[in-house]
């Protein structure tokens, strides 16, 4: 799996780019005839493409017959007729494993993949394509890849030498830093890729380099030094490092593809003052996967911190949090998937690191204690079961009463108030306020909504506590931003979360195309070089399908359905099918009326609409919020301030 990184300068006031002209599709001629002895890339089911030497080639068009053999030696085999049209000439640089793939005379998918494979086999995980850095996750430690020598080489290279250095994430970071200095513009490094591609590790490397690059306003290149011990820059870097265990404990989880997958997006601003000295940092978080709190797929885990809590608390703390009564296998939030451990990970030891990180951002002992008690409350809250009478009015089951009392005590509220809020709803009419009983299923939904809200708000609060230690807006005049967000996602079952994530990636892809291709063409024009328009896939029509208001894109259709009192997921799916039936990027499987598919730039994804309305509203009912606002615990009160709007971030 590969990830791509691109450094681009962009002012925060930049308007949204207007749609790019629709590109023409460029195809390799199907009747291309290859010279005997030349090297070509031939489609292969296992390796995508393999380099072969042409043994013979006769005929044109559909009658072309091609025989290829090994690069060295004799023999050959006929290329199947269905594959002949996909055979392409092999660029010599691709066969060698070139550093920069824009230098290829013919940059094809086959050449790119073979070049990456060749370099990967030599432990050269970084490759360039102009301003783009491609990285292939090695899933191992490579000696010498992140040394002080590599850092100094990037720092000391002049403007002409830097692009010719071996591709490296440090070189990309150096470009961003110099752009901030020389162009006086805010800079952003966009990190994208599939789950498990190594985005988070790449982001850490960028942060580490840029922090080290800030040396009190020294010039670009020419012997720049590493961080001065005891400097403010070192303090800021240490604060960012100290915050990381908190972000990973509360925001990362084991998935089928990655044992430490970030289930949220983050944008880290490394701030600089007017002298271009590092003055602070700010962490923004996006799209926390709150549904994971109450539901995980088979073979995956909930967020790491739950397992840290259950394995790392002392016997005394465990008893005080009421977690000594139930075994891990009995807890609903961690027993669903059949996976509670990760090879090589000591959850108990990691809890100590998380606690130390909270102390490092100046959280007091009582605050840390309340955070852990709130986590325990989420675990116990999820254990509540409900009974209902003949009129389908629910109540907390008798056997669950002790759990109700324990969960309420942990967040310092009254058990009766919590029970009432879970099992009823207040409806405000024009003339009166009516209390309506909920049935068992609705009470279960309320329980899950409260568990997700508690966890999501706790994570956001912790990030803000990190920012209190990091941010110095009074001194900040510029920043280098690093965006690390979910890559494109496609699972066996895809829901609203995947639509949001893939929509974000569609937007980033358009911005990426706009910045990279527009920048390249502007450079050609500035240097007076003759050029032809760069051809690329434009995803504007797919974006319109999702978000264009005038044509009732999917998100606008969903918003409208959420406003209707009797709206349902089924009606939303039906309206989506009716409205966009003729759209080229929309598909509606006939067998499942609750499913539709979107043809994204990275592939076609089918979305199951169950739960779309509730997830889109993302609200916690006022009754539940009001109960939490009565808490006697300062941390819980901070999560549910009375003046806060009810829509969660």
Image (spheres, rainbow, N blue to C red):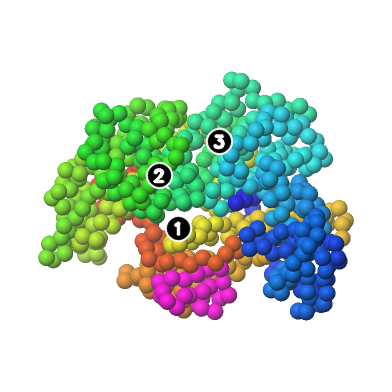
Task: Tell me the quarter of the picture where residue 224 sits.
Answer: top right
Report how far apart the C-alphas of labels 3 and 2 lie in the structure: 25 Å
Q: Is residue 479 visible?
A: no
Task: Tell me the quarter of the picture where residue 558 sits.
Answer: bottom left
Confirm whether the magenta stretch covers residue 530. Answer: no
Confirm whether the magenta stretch covers residue 587. Answer: yes
**Residue shown at 60% from the left, 48% from the top:** 191
- Observer-side mark, 1 or 3, equals 1
Task: Tell me the quarter of the picture where residue 215 sits.
Answer: top right
- Disc on the earlier residue, 3 or 2: 3
**Image disc number at residue 281:** 3
Figure check: 557 above or below 125: below
Mark 2 highlights which residue?
A: 303
Mark 1 highlights which residue?
A: 497
- Observer-side mark, 3 or 2, equals 2
- Disc on the earlier residue, 1 or 2: 2
Report how far apart the C-alphas of labels 1 and 3 lie in the structure: 28 Å
Number of marks present in the image shown? 3
* Residue sitting at the far top: 230
568 on left or right of 60: left
423 on left or right of 313: left
Q: Is residue 607 visible?
A: yes
Magenta residues span 579-599
Figure check: 165 above or below 442: above
């Amino acid at each position: 799996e590969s990830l791509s990184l691109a450094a681009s300068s962009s002012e925060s006031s930049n308007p949204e780019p207007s749609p790019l002209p629709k590109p023409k599709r460029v195809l390799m001629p199907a009747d291309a005839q290859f010279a005997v002895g030349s090297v070509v890339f031939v489609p292969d089911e296992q390796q995508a493409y393999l380099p072969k030497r042409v043994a013979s080639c006769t005929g044109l068009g559909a009658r072309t017959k091609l025989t290829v053999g090994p690069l060295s030696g004799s023999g050959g085999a006929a290329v199947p007729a269905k594959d002949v049209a996909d055979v392409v000439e092999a660029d010599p640089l691709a066969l060698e494993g070139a550093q920069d793939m824009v230098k290829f005379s013919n940059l094809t998918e086959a050449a790119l993949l073979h070049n990456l494979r060749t370099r990967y086999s030599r432990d050269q995980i970084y490759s360039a394509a102009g301003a783009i850095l491609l990285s292939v996750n090695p899933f191992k430690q490579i000696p010498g890849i992140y040394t002080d020598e590599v850092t100094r080489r990037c720092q000391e290279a002049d403007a002409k030498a830097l692009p010719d250095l071996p591709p490296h994430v440090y070189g990309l970071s150096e470009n961003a830093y110099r752009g901030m200095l020389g162009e006086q513009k805010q800079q952003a490094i966009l990190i994208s890729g599939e789950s498990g591609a190594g985005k988070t590790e790449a982001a850490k490397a960028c942060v580490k380099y840029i922090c080290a690059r800030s040396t009190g306003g020294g010039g670009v290149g020419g012997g720049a030094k590493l961080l001065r011990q005891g400097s403010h820059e070192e303090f800021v870097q240490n604060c960012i490092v100290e915050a990381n265990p908190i972000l990973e404990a509360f925001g990362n989880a084991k998935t089928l593809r990655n044992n430490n997958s970030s289930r949220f997006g983050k944008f880290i601003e490394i701030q600089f003052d007017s002298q271009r000295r590092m003055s602070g940092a700010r962490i923004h978080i996006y799209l926390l996967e709150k549904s994971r709190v109450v539901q995980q797929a088979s073979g995956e885990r909930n967020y790491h911190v739950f397992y840290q809590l259950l394995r790392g608390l002392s016997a005394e703390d465990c008893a005080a949090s009421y977690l000594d009564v139930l075994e891990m296998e009995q807890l609903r939030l961690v027993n669903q998937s059949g996976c509670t451990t990760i090879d090589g990970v000591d959850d108990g030891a990691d809890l100590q690191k998380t606690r130390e990180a909270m102390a490092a951002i100046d959280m007091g002992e009582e605050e840390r204690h309340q955070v852990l008690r709130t986590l325990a409350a989420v675990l116990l809250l999820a254990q509540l079961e409900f009974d209902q009478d003949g009129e389908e009015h629910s109540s907390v089951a008798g056997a669950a009463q002790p759990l109700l009392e324990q969960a309420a005590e942990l967040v310092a509220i009254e058990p009766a108030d919590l029970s009432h809020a879970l099992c009823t709803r207040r409806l405000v009419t024009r003339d009166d306020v009516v209390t309506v009983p909920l049935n068992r299923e609705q009470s279960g939904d309320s329980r899950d909504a409260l568990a997700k809200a508690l966890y999501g708000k706790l994570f956001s609060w912790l990030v803000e506590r990190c920012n209190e230690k990091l941010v110095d807006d009074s001194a900040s005049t510029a920043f280098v931003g690093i965006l690390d967000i979910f890559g494109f996602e496609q699972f066996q079952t895809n829901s609203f979360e995947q639509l949001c994530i893939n929509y974000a990636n569609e937007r980033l892809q358009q911005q990426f195309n706009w910045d990279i291709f527009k920048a390249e063409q502007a450079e050609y024009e500035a240097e007076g070089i003759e050029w032809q328009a760069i051809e690329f896939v434009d995803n504007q029509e797919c974006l319109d399908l999702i978000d264009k208001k005038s044509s009732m894109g999917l998100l606008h259709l969903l918003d409208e359905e959420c406003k209707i009192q009797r709206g349902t997921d089924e009606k939303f799916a039906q309206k989506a099918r009716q409205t966009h039936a003729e759209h080229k990027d929309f598909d509606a499987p006939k067998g499942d009326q609750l499913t539709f598919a979107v043809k994204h730039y990275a592939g076609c994804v089918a979305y199951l609409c169950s739960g779309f309305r509730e997830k889109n509203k993302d609200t916690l009912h006022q009754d539940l919020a009001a109960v939490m606002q009565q808490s006697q615990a300062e941390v819980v009160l901070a999560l549910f301030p009375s003046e806060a709007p009810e829509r969660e971030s």
